[in-house]
């Protein structure tokens, strides 16, 4: 029987994308499926779908921060108190860099995501600045290679990588993040949006919630 597959579309700007990445990357429940991370530009998805950002919706703008913190507590995820500098950040530089890493250094993509999510959603750093993206990635690639990767974000070829990934997300059904594209062991595919659907994701993939710890045991 084939292993289940999970494709997770991500943008550094989204706190819920960070939560989804942290759980998928660190929780043992997902060791039983093949995971692929895909860098996209959330702003492009929102615009294409005519979707209004939560922070521009009355009452939801206040609720969304509390909801973020509740999920972080549920899964013991470190997260910045309040919102990072310049939120919501323009993440074209980080997104293009990650798309380039996905193509040229795929085995290091999870570590690159970990570094950039930590900079923004744990330390509150301004990832809209190219120099901050580069310094964040030094721990993964070293100073010279990190700066080289970031310096290529203005190239048409690199822009095309992120645009192509964003279009893939739209074709998959995404209208926000995190977007989970799941294929179970029988080859059936389903899409799920949001960390509040983690329970359904796990169930569809045929994973055992009991292996996921307290966070998953408390979910329907």
Image: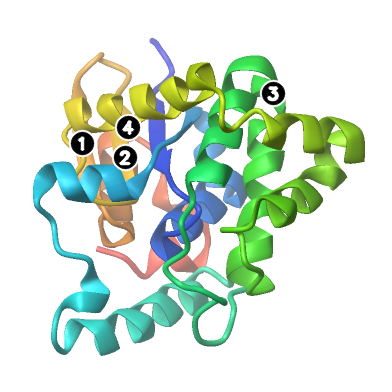
Which quadrant would residue 64 be assigned to in this image?
bottom left
Residues marked 4 and 3 touching at CB (< 8 Å): no
- For residue 180, the mark is 2
Residue 14, above or below 35: below
From mark 4 to mark 3, how far is it between C-alphas? Answer: 21 Å
Depth check, mark 4 against mark 1: the one in front is 4
* Circles 1 and 2: CB atoms closer than 8 Å: yes
Q: How far apart are the two marked residues, 4 and 1, measured between alpha carbons?
A: 15 Å
Q: Which mark is residue 166?
A: 4
Q: Nearer the viewer, residue 133 or 152?
A: 152
Name which residue lies at 61% across and 35% down.
Answer: 97
Q: Is residue 159 above or below residue 118?
A: above
Give the answer, above or below, for where 26 lies relative to 181: below
Q: CA distance from mark 1 to mark 2?
A: 6 Å
The number of numbered badges drawn on the structure is 4
143 left or right, relative to 52 = right
Residue located beneath label 1 in the image: 191
Quadrant where the N terminus lies? top left
Dot placed on the residue nearer the N-terminal end, 1 or 3: 3
Please tell me which of labels 2 and 3 falls first in the chain: 3
Q: Give the residue at mark 3.
A: 107
For label 3, the crowd category at 10 Å Cα-Cα, with few meaning under 14, some 14 to 19 and many 20 or more, is: few
Query: Mark 1 vs mark 2: which is more N-terminal?
Result: 2
Dot 3: element: helix
Q: Position of residue 44 (x, y in %)?
A: 27, 43
Which SS class for mark 4?
Answer: helix
């Amino acid at each position: 029987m084939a292993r289940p597959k999970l494709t997770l579309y991500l943008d550094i700007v989204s706190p819920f994308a960070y939560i989804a990445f942290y759980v998928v990357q660190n929780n043992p429940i997902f060791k039983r499926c093949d995971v692929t991370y895909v860098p996209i530009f959330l702003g492009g998805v929102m615009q294409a779908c005519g979707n209004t950002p939560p922070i521009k919706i009355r009452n939801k703008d206040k609720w969304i921060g509390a909801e973020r913190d509740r999920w972080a507590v549920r899964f013991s995820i470190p997260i910045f108190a309040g919102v990072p500098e310049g939120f919501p950040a323009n993440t074209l530089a980080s997104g293009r860099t990650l798309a380039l890493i996905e193509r040229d250094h795929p085995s290091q993509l999870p570590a690159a995501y970990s570094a950039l999510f930590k900079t923004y959603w744990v330390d509150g750093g301004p990832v809209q600045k190219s120099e901050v993206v580069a310094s964040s990635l030094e721990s993964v690639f070293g100073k010279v290679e990190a700066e080289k990767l970031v310096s290529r974000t203005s190239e048409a070829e690199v822009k095309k990588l992120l645009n192509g990934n964003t279009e893939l997300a739209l074709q998959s059904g995404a209208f926000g993040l995190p977007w989970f594209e799941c294929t179970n062991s029988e080859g059936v595919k389903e899409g799920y949006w949001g960390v509040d659907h983690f329970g359904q994701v796990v169930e569809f993939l045929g994973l055992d919630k009991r292996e996921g710890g307290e966070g998953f045991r408390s979910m329907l």
